[in-house]
Image: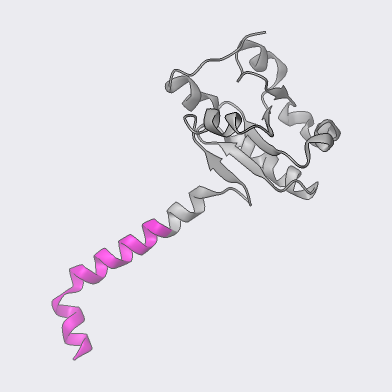
Amino acid sequence: MYIEFITEYWYLFATLFVIILLLSFDQGARGVGGSKLVTPTQLPQLQSRGNVVIVDVNEADKFKHGHISHAINLPFGRFGDSIGKLKKHKNKSIVLTCDTGTNSRKAVAILKNNEFSDIYVLSGGLAAWRKDNLPLVKS
């Protein structure tokens, strides 16, 4: 009886499988190694609540060409060695950003290993920030 139903309506089961698969990918994209994703349009709202530190993990030359206002620059190449600069912000939300989000995702593990708990990654990085025409500071 069940086999007849499944063979008759195979396309329903295929659709169900695809939906389950897409939902599992969506859950994986929501967080990166215990962090949360924040979109460029959500970040100013998060900042307005206060108690947020933005950490740009781009190299210093890229940081000078454009970064989010009040961001701290801790280049990814030396991020593990620079983590001491963030210790005083352990009880704050940390938002990691870089050009595309790749190095930010890698930096999450370093923060987790140093007992930081409220970690966000800017979804799409500064490329998404620029795409949404949000302001950057040059120094």
Quadrant (top left, top right, bottom left, bottom right) of the N terminus: bottom left
Q: Nearer the viewer, residue 58 or 119?
A: 119
Q: Position of residue 34 (x, y in %)?
A: 63, 52
**x and y percentages locating residue 92 in the rendered image:** 72, 39
Q: Main secondary structure of the magenta part?
A: helix
Of all residues, the one furthest to the front in this rendering is 49
Residue at the extreme bottom: 1
Report the residue at 86% width, 34% height from top: 84
Position of residue 134 relative to residue 116, above or below, is: above
Left or right for 4, reference 50: left
Is 108 in the magenta? Answer: no
Q: Nearer the viewer, residue 70 or 80?
A: 70
Looking at the image, the residue that sits furthest to the top is 139
Residue at 25% from the left image edge and 67% from the top image edge: 14
Q: Which residues are magenta?
A: 1-23
Q: Position of residue 116 (x, y in %)?
A: 75, 46
Q: Quadrant of residue 78?
A: top right
Count every numbered label the image shows and give the total. Answer: 0
Which residue is rendered at x = 69% and y = 34% of the image? 51
